[in-house]
Image (tube, grey):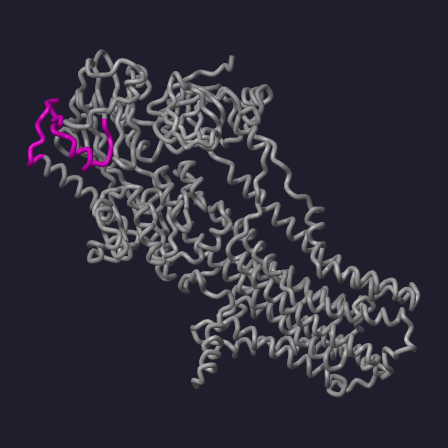
Amino acid sequence: MLQSNLEKGIVGDDSDLLNRKNKYGSNTYPQKPGRSFWRFLWEAWQDLTLIILMIAAVASLVLGIKTEGIKEGWYDGGSIAFAVILVIVVTAISDYRQSLQFQNLNKEKRNIQVEVVRGGRRIEVSIYDIVVGDVIPLNIGDQVPADGILISGHSLAIDESSMTGESKIVQKHGKEPFLMSGCKVADGNGTMLVTSVGVNTEWGLLMASISEDNGEETPLQVRLNGVATLIGIVGLTVAFAVLVVLLARYFTGHSKNPDGSRQFIAGQTKVGRAVDGAIKIVTIAVTIVVVAVPEGLPLAVTLTLAYSMRKMMADKALVRRLSACETMGSATTICSDKTGTLTVNQMTIVEAYAGGKKIDPPEKKSEFSPTLHSLLVEGIALNSNGSVYVPESGGEVEVTGSPTEKAILNWGIKLGMNFEALRTESTILHVFPFSSDKKRGGVACQQDNQVHVHWKGAAEIVLASCTQYMDEHDQFVQLDEDKMKYFKRAIEDMASRSLRCVAIAYRPVDPENVPDSEEQLSKWALPEEDLVLLAIVGLKDPCRPGVKDAVRLCQNAGVKVRMVTGDNVQTARAIALECGILGSDSDATEPNLIEGKVFRALSDAQREEVAEKISVMGRSSPNDKLLLVQALRKRGHVVAVTGDGTNDAPALHEADIGLAMGIQGTEVAKESSDIIILDDNFASVVKVVRWGRSVYANIQKFIQFQLTVNVAALIINVVAAISSGGVPLNAVQLLWVNLIMDTLGALALATEPPTNHLMDRPPVGRREPLITNIMWRNLLIQAFYQVTVLLVLNFRGRSLLHLNHSKFEAIKVQNTLIFNAFVLCQIFNEFNARKPDEKNIFKGVTKNYLFIGIIAITVILQVIIIEFLGKFTSTVRLNWKYWIISIIIGLISWPLAFLGKFIPVPETPFHVLIIRMFRKRQSGQP
């Protein structure tokens, strides 16, 4: 009824696929829609300080219209209301855009590539493109992509815990053939027929009823929320003190108008005017809170994480957990796989030993005796989970499978192997899937009443199980000591030249010793002793181009790269020397170079000691990798681990950052990881380190910038308010500054791309303070300069600038100049914040178009505000003279920042120095 061939699958052309999707549905399920823009708008205006400002704006609007008429009286209240609405809208747009980015990344996370059989050939398709009737091969670590029925399987065990909640592994066979979408293959292999997809599956029904929660907060966001709350409390305290002082001044008659008259006279001032005056004072206090509370800090983290995640996708890294972005910047060591990560994972057989001698070239068919050739191609064809597709119309043969499988199958084809014929003529009785622990895999097959068990795996391990070999005359010859030494030397020689060595062996089995029933067969332990050696082959897998530079970049950055591989120690040594993990032959000694079994035999204390020194671990099992990660973490390291196999899952989970391979990685490994490396390339791992450091560095840049503005604005308004009863920066002006700081500033500084300079410094410590001493130095220099210049302008501006206007006009010009100079100081200071610890603050600025664009937009908007929107911002037009003064005041921040870089700063964190000074003072020490 499904019109599917159990061996060749469906036809798979466009009309067939469309027909199946229309009839049975597609393998997708309806996603609950994300939060709408209106929801973000609703959340943005619920900020308490903004609500108070809105109430103040409405009250100011009503009183203004009442006292001055609708034509003039709406400016103050309307301006505040407009500024608040602008802040709300910009914040909502920014949050909404980041939400869309996170949704797209989450969709990408679920887009798994699956191998299917269509038209007799194996192809990779997206999990979303699977249709009912598809035949799908399943291997260890795969996710079952849809509901279906088992066609055939060998030792197939499924982890159904994601569906049933029970951690028990379920064996699948003829009597228990049903497979559920979303479950993982724990052991064995098999093929399945898809019977239902999408919402018609158990998994689809479950996923349609829940929505993914994207509200994950990273440790950095939590820390910044704490910082923002602390600064907010300080701002609130200061604002309350200012409110009390200003209200006291106002109602005691000490506050004066520009013409010198008192603003409030008891018994004479009308109630409406008194309330209006009080509202303006409340507005000043609330505005101080708006400026003091750095709500842009958490926004900056969201921005930089969203930006980094999007850019990391382009750099072939898919982030599954947000916190991994920032943790990667603190990584002190990377435990990397060899095959496919440090090497290109495109293997070819370049050397072969068979019949007791070296075959040169390895595909020279005439060098193989008939029986040896027959057994060898039988073993290659049957003991493989790869496949060979020969197009009926002719053309190139397609070989699929793991890189090792593909290399061996290609060698078999060159030797004249007919893959389909051998598979058809033989009956596979039982399969022992390749295991990372045992380093070998086997198959029992029957042909013409003969049963053969074929083994294939790590050369020295398979060789140790062999007692005979087949010579060039098809005779079984005992493996004596000399011949064993000959083969071991061949393996060592190939390994020293960075070849991966694989041995192929077999043994005949009496059919009477083979179990009869399917149940007994599934539990049958394949004979693995007294094997007959057929061949030993050497596979070449060259180093990836650029890996040596990537390793050197890591080492310069204080990140130690360690190779952990299941390959022979000598092969690992050769590759490690080639890619720079080992500096020279003199480094290639214990404990720098160690074997897995030696490491696991050590005590816990010894392992911790040795782990520090290990650069290469060969013949390691997944458990050895886990032990190494645990030992390194106990020593205080922040450990990143790469892995691709199902058995790597514990190490990936245990590490601070788990990096799964996107091409060779199993779904189990990907589920346990924090980041998926889409191209399996070590150079991409190094890019992730750079991005991790960039996230942290960008947050620090923004903190330095925002706190400079906070401190300067707070001190200027507080000093002016307490001393004169008025403030040079009013509510609307400060809201505009707040917009520059929070949204535009975050966008400019949180999206700085990473530079190689980030890789010239050591990793960021877990407990390193967010605000470093270098940041404190830069922040205090700039804040001191801004406060000094602007307070001088506030108290002596009219005489210094020779303002001969009326007192009211002179104050307006002076306050406009202060506002303009303050904004331009922040614009120029954004350049300083780009490079907190470098003397050249302009390095790379021309390449960052977003930064340049935001600076340009800010300058244009500032000109529009001063020149055209004076009525709304309580400013006046400035002539060219005052614009030049404003620009010069802002420009001076650049040489100040440059000279400040020469002031040495202690390494001890600032807050620790303060505590030490306080303690010394308490104890009477000098």
User: Is 429 on the left-hand or right-hand side of 778?
Assistant: left
Q: Is residue 460 magenta?
A: yes
Quadrant placement of the C terminus: bottom left
The residue at 65%/49% (across/down) is 96
Left or right of 478? Residue 303 is right
Give above or below for 191 relative to 885. above
Q: Tell me residue 414's x, y (percent).
A: 27, 27
Residue 655 image offset from top left, x and y in percent: 39, 49
Q: Nearer the viewer, residue 238 or 75?
A: 238
Q: Is residue 618 placed above or below 115 in the rendered structure?
A: below
Residue 172 visible in the current orientation = yes
Task: State how many labels appear.
Answer: 0
Magenta span of residues: 455-483
**Residue 619: image location, x then y, percent:** 24, 43
Image location (x, y in percent) of residue 707:
60, 69
Q: Residue furthest front?
A: 923
Between residue 681 and residue 301, name the one nearer to us.
Answer: 301
Of 431 and 247, the residue lying toward us: 247
Give residue 210's quadrant in the image.
top right
Give me the residue at 79% from left, 63% from top.
56
The residue under the point 69% across, 67% down is 289
730 to 694, vertically: above or below: below
Q: Please say whether residue 845 is one of the residues in the magenta stretch.
A: no
The residue positioned 27% from the left and 37% from the top of the image is 437
The answer to whether one can see residue 577 in this image is no
Left or right: 503 with respect to 824?
Answer: left
Q: Quadrant of residue 749?
A: bottom right
